[in-house]
Amino acid sequence: MDFFLFLVVNGIAVGGIYALVALGFVLIYKATGAINFAQGEVLLICAYLVYAFLVQLELPLWLAILAAFFVAMLLGLTIERLFLRPLVGEPVASVIMVTIGLAYLLRGVIRFAWGSVERNFPLIFAGPPIAVAGVTVKMVHLWALGLATACLVVFSLLFKYSATGVRMRAAADNQRAALSLGIDVNRMFALSWMVAALLAAVGAMIIGQMNVLSIELSYIGLTVFPVVILGGLDSVVGAVVGGLVIGVIENLAGGYLGAYLPGAVKFIVPYIVLLVILLIRPYGFFGTHEIERV
Amino acid sequence: MSVGVRPCGEFARGYPEDERVLKTRFVRASMAAFIGLLFILPFIAGGYVLAIVSGILIAVVGATGLNILTGYTGLISVGQGAFMGVGAYTVAVLATVWNIPFWLTLPAAGLVTAAVGAVFGLPSLRLKGFYLAIATLAAQFILDYTFMNWESVTKGAVGILVPRPALLGHALANDAEFYYFLLVPAVLGVVVGRNLFRTHVGRALIAVRDQDLAAEILGVNVLKMKLVAFALSSFFAGVAGGLVAYYTTSVAPGAFNLSLSIDYLAMIIIGGLGTSTGPILGAIFVLLIPDVLQHLIEMLRNVVDVSYTFAALREIIFGLFIIGFLIGKPEGLARFWRDFRAYWKLWPFAY
Amino acid sequence: MRLRMLFVGLMLALVIGLPLAGAPASAEDKIVLGIMGDFTGPTAAGESLAYGRRDYVNWINSKGGVAGHKIQDIFIDGKGTAQTELPVFKQMVERGAVAILMWSTSGGLAMRDLVNKLHKIPVMMPGQSMELVDPVNYPYMFILGPTYEDQIKILLDYAKATGAKTVAFLNDDTGFGKSGIDNIMKMKYAECIGLTVVGRIEFPSQAPDLTTEMARLKSLDPDFAYFHGPITPAIRIAQASHAVGVRTLRAGYFGTAVPAMAGLGAAAEKWTAPRLYVDFAGDAPVLREIAEYEKVREVPAKHKIMNYVQGWTEARVMVEGIRRAVEKNGGKIPTPIATFRQMVRDEIHGLKNFDLAGATAQIVDYANHQGNGKARLVQDKGGNFADITGYEAPKGKCR
């Protein structure tokens, strides 16, 4: 029982991180209808930016974080303006493939600027581990959970009740109709990318914390897919809940199946879950029931 | 495909003539010359050129398959690499365990891969939207894991060493023989791919991409067509993977990763989605770009030394090309080619 | 119409002419060395090794070459997989390479017949896998240094010497990590020297958090634990095991003794690893050589790591084989190319007591195609990796 509790608590801790990354992804989908294959790379570039400001330029912590946020938003704006605006009105397939190309491009830029060598990420969320239900949890995980929940609340309210949020959803739902209603679709897209980049910056600070800084960090962008399928591609609540659930499932699989099945089975269990969910409940647990079946 | 421009004096006298793929005498002569060139290549080129062209031939098979799925039917797949792996391992196992000859293993590889594809594709093909992209991503990772860990079959990290294919007892060992061996499936693949879109099946696939609701109303069974597209593309991928197995004589888990899948996507995007020459042009482009880049960097070594950043530059250029072609010239290199041919046909007239 | 025909004829001539023109000029009067790297593929993080190889050749050329002949290097990205390295290999052979510094282990295995039977060309691989070392069946393939398995054995010897009784193995799910631990467990070396293997933990390479796995390690509670896999998961292991609080002595492969690991501070304390090549923080004649080369061309700081020294040294061995072959031929390049390759191979095979300028342990006798089976061990003490042993070979009698 102890072991089970340990796995669950740790799963929730890791899940907070997944939730943060998934939020950025969901935001883009909700506002533009596009599946963003480059979320991991955006996160990666934000992590390197934080590193650059904090370690290479040696700015004080508050300034470095603010600078990173600012540049991240600028990055989101640039990406939207340069690469996605020309595709307004084009089929979404093109947008998705552009994000795949974008992922490559961003990785190349990072490699060009910082090389492939691993670096130590500076400690931001330092502090002794805390005991939760008899299990020690690192400070950084609690921060992740806290931030994810805060974002969840903010964005849920934003999308439901604020004018901007509703306009965003309209723009994603039907570009032409939104345009005809006078909604500035371009601005909505730009806004969503800026905020997604901001979220990526937050996520980067958390993830960098527990890891060495290297190009492989961008892989977290791919582990986000089981989360958003489980939670629903367009659901903010789903992203957070999905993140926690996937974190727990992953840990349970690793803990209990790891002894019987070879290799790193905990890595693929979320993907098997993904396929199962697609079969039985394709819109996820919190997504809109809009998927038409053929 | 397009009607094309016919020069004066060439006209069709009946439907069979009108529907020909190669419409004019000039085009037919050029095609014959091109095929002839392909056949005599081993006699005029060295092992290096043959190796490059062999790699391109294999890629053409895989890219044509992916083009059927993504270019013509509009379904994005990021699992092409893993499916090629399935084909490669099928060939490897059949050839090493039961000594089955290549003319059985290659089709078997295609069929096995189509079956595996169906397992991963089925859940998502019933849904509208881009769930196939996500399902194939899952397939990529799950298959990677299987290749690495199903040791009894795939021999894990060490991989399987595949003997050369044998024709009538004679093992195809040298470059030239192997080149001809690869030429057959490549040409077959392109021909099948091209002809598919002159049949009702092909037209149904295009309808599914453009307006599936209207297609459904017209009586096209959208689900069935999507499955057909996915099965075909997986079949091609499986055969391409089998060819890789024979060509490199060793099948290891790391070679069929997400990077390879993205390379194939890049090939059909840059080559031109939904065209028949697209996969060929795209394969040539994607496979040759790193070499061209390398030579360029070497030449520029005295002007500006960027040789230490080669990896980064290659990724940046690759990404920029994918994005650039999608934004600027969605019909890719095939469009350039078509425009070029039209220019030559019409010169000195502008149109 | 006629213009068009002319145009087509011209194109055809070009298309046929190009491959012919691409045929190599006679290479009978040049020394050509093929150098493969991986800049864009799965092992691209080790690209500094490729630059080290090339820069050694540049340095030798800047000092006049080998017996008065300059070495022409063909420096190409092999992209790290067997399929992509195959055309590169063929290009190098066609352009008259007398030897090739290859790259991936899977590539080396895939091309074993091309190397050893068809072209009979000496090659060297940087990956220290035991599958590549077979002087009888693969007489033209060399590696430099102890195999990964040898290195693990040296570590196990050290663990035993410091009083350990139980050991656990860890690996990630890359081919590299898996095969290393598969092999060492198959050899049963740990049992042979009197250690008990209490478990093996495997995990995905990309898992961002390894707390669960380290909890399992803690429950197994071995005296010594060895992780085989790349540096990134190794760092996560160091962090997670420290956070969970294990008393185990932890170790990784030689690529884990890098500043990124030491920079973890307390979490990496007492992390042990073999060190095969000196890195730029150390002191050895080879570093002075590199400094001398920098007067010709600057080496970017990000490439000044251990891998660079390894590449430098590999090239050194190859060039030495070439030098001896040329000198034996009276200072002229041996012809035809097949003879030259054979001579170079024989010279390398026959190297004895060859000094590597302190880069790594001396080559005592290269007949085993490894050169030396020795490695030093280093341990992280207060943020720096310090030597804890001299160059040692595995001691246990079991193979």
Image (cartoon, rainbow, N blue to C red):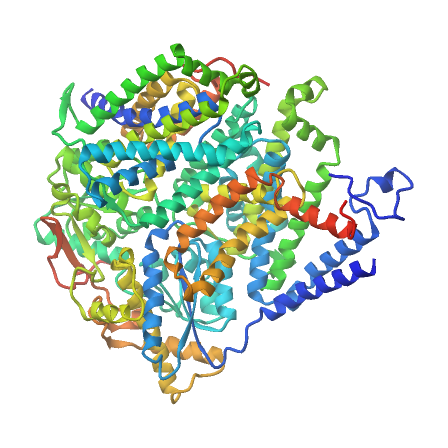
Q: Is residue C244 above or below residue C186?
A: above
Q: Residue furthest top?
A: A161
Residue found farthest to the right? B13
Q: Nearer the viewer, residue A152 or C158?
A: A152
User: Is A3 above or below relative to A56?
Assistant: above
Q: Is residue A217 visible?
A: yes
A131 with respect to B346 (left or right): left
Q: Is residue C287 left or right of residue C72?
A: left
Where on the picture, by quarter, is residue A206? top left
**Quadrant of the snapshot with the C terminus of chain B:** top right
Q: Position of residue C239 (x, y in %)?
A: 18, 38
Between residues A148 and C134, which one lies in front from this camera angle? A148
Q: Residue at x 81, y 54 (%)?
A: B26
The answer to whether residue A220 is left or right of residue C385 is: right
**Image coords of residue C115 (percent x, y):** 45, 67
Question: Taking B87 as reference, is B232 left or right?
Answer: right
Q: Residue sitting at 54 percent across and 14 percent down?
A: A181
Q: Quadrant of residue C372?
A: bottom left
Q: Determine if residue A38 is in view.
A: no
Pick the front one: B218 or B167: B218
Q: Residue sitting at 10 percent across and 39 percent down?
A: C247
